[in-house]
Image (cartoon, grey):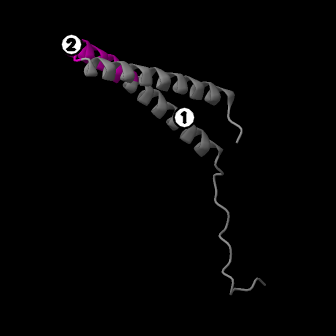
Amino acid sequence: MNRHPSTEAERLMLDAKKAILQEQHRRFQELQKEGRWSDAMQQLHVTLSCAADLLKDSVGLLERTVNQRQENKPTSLPDPPLPPDSKAS
């Protein structure tokens, strides 16, 4: 499927943000395992901020994609096919 270049760029940005989130989460878990609770709580704040940012951008991309597809949809639906037992005149 061909994607719009801006959509591809957005997907790359989301992938980068996901990688950052994974690294922040790894750091949080490491601090937690070491028993560095004060540092872990500070890291948790950073991790949650990254997660919120990724989620917000993901939802935005999804909304734009859905809206774009709805704009490209035909305004009227084709007639449904005739049942197999009916005969066209």
The quadrant in which the C terminus is found is: bottom right
Residue 13 visible from this viewpoint: yes
Q: Position of residue 17 (x, y in %)?
A: 49, 22
Q: Position of residue 36 (x, y in %)?
A: 23, 14
- For residue 64, the mark is 1
Image: magenta residue range: 35-50
Query: In the figure, residue 3 lies in which quadrant?
Result: top right
> Gap in Å between the C-alphas at discs 2 and 1?
40 Å
Tell me if 57 is positioned left or right of 85 in this view: left
The quadrant in which the N terminus is found is: top right
Q: Measuring 66% from the left and 80% from the top, which residue is drawn there?
A: 83
Q: Main secondary structure of the magenta part?
A: helix
Q: Measuring 46% from the left and 34% from the top, which residue is drawn there?
A: 59
- For residue 38, the mark is 2
Residue 49 visible from this viewpoint: no
Q: Position of residue 56 (x, y in %)?
A: 42, 28
